Image (cartoon, helix red, strand yellow):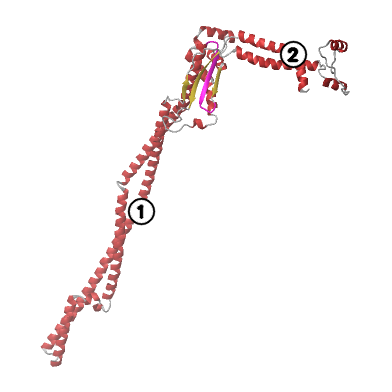
Amino acid sequence: MNFTQFLLVLRARKRIILATMFSVVSLILVGSLLWPNSYKATASVVLNYKGIDPVSGLTMPGQLLPGYISTQLDIIGSKRVALGVVDSLKLASSPAVVEQFNADTNGKGNVRDWLAGLLLKKLDAQPSRESSVVDINFSGSDPQFVAAVANAFAEEYQKVNVQLKVDPMRKASAYFDSQTKVLRDNVDAAQSRLSKYQQEHGIVSLDNRLDVESNRLNDLSAQLVMAQGQLAEANSRQNMAAGSNGAESPDVAANPLIQNLKANLNVAESKFAEVSQRLSPNHPQYQSSKAELDKLRAELAQQVKVISNSVGNNATVLRQREASIRAALAEQKAKVLELNRTRDELAGLQKDAESAQRAYDATSQRLSQTRLEGQSEQSDVAILTPAVPPIQPSFPRPILNTIVGLFLGAILGLAVGLLREMLDRRVRSDSDLATLTSVPLLGTVNWANTQQSSRIKKIFTPRKLRLN
């Protein structure tokens, strides 16, 4: 079917098309006039209007979540919010509502739940495009009532939003409170162990004491090295002085008494040599000189022995000193090692106490913040525009419905006309005849408004031509 044939069909079926369109428009218009008026009130709220938590000062991550707006819409349309609206408006206490509830449900169930379900059926929350504004729409037959319900939904949504944020914080606060007590006990126990250990070991300042003992150990080490050197030298002198040539020992030879005795001995030997040349051995002077010489020699030998013994005694003293310094060094080393062990144990106890203190401080800080967040009544939702009682009904709208009825009636009329044409197909043009007979078309008759043509038209007017 081409466009010309379509126009011919419309002209032929214009009565049924117009009748259908008129019927549809009439029905819609009558329905709009008879349908009870319905009013819609809108309360607008802003989500996350600050973006910063008033307690922690951090940016709240709600606006970063892709489903944040959808979640808020679900909260608005939740039964919890609807029950809050029922309670705030005291709808369940109305005798008329209770009577209607009993009539509809035969007294089964709860009137609050029944009312919440009815309110949610007439509630519609719509987010604005590319913004955080949400419109809370409520429809009903009473303008004052729909405005009150819309505002009640906005206010209850604010309260529920605060409760959803505060309730977890309060539970977390209780948990942190119990953990703080446990950590406080741990801190007291760690501090008690540290204090007890310091008292048992008499520790006031371990680092200073360790420094003093370490310096003393170093001094003893230096004294031991010095004493060992002196002892080695004393042993050498002792060995030389105790030998066969003890008189040649530096300690013996450098002694003033030995030097004086040697000088006297030399003088006595010179005198005895002179006397022995002049006098005989039996001469009294000879015997006197020899006796003096023997006395000096004996005294020199005795003094050499005494000095050699003194050198040995010095070596013995140095040996005892070296032994005592070595013993003191060993004792000091053991004391320093004990202090190192004590310092390690004390450092471990101090680390335990510091770790317990840090854990307690962190938990206390988190407890304080969580407790403040749990007590905060600051909501992430602000009412942008409260609902006001509407003046004009939102439904029905006769003019708009009539325009829509014209459009729908035209479409339905065209559909009915085309369907009628398909069920009762007629020859509307020469192309239809050519299609029907499959014979070349030689010409057409011009049905002009003349008498001759009228007679011809009466003669040749077909009764009915259908395309089968």
Mark 1, Cα crowd under 10 Å, few <14 / some 14-19 / many 20+, is some
- Label 2 element class: helix
Residue displayed at 52% across by 31% down: 65
- Label 1 element class: helix
Q: Quadrant of the C terminus?
A: top right
Residue displayed at 26% across by 67% down: 316
Q: Quadrant of residue 307?
A: bottom left
Residue displayed at 55% across by 19% down: 124
Dot 2 amino acid type: Lys
Dot 1 amino acid type: Leu
- The reply to whether callout 2 and callout 1 are in contact (CB within 8 Å) is no
Left or right of 452 in this view: 166: left
Stretch in magenta: 129-142
Q: Which residue is mark 1?
A: 337
Task: Residue 400: give x, y in percent of width and height.
Answer: 61, 15
Against 136, residue 329 (above or below) is: below
Mark 2, Cα crowd under 10 Å, few <14 / some 14-19 / many 20+, is some
Which badge, 2 or 1, is on the more N-terminal residue?
Answer: 2
Q: Which residue is mark 2?
A: 14
Residue 131 within the segment the image draws in magenta: yes
Residue 190 within the segment the image draws in magenta: no
Task: Residue 185: give x, y in percent of width and height.
Answer: 38, 35
Toward the viewer: 79 or 382?
382
Toward the viewer: 303 or 449?
449
**What label does residue 216 carry, if any?**
none
Against 259, residue 322 (above or below) is: above
- Say whether residue 375 is visible: yes
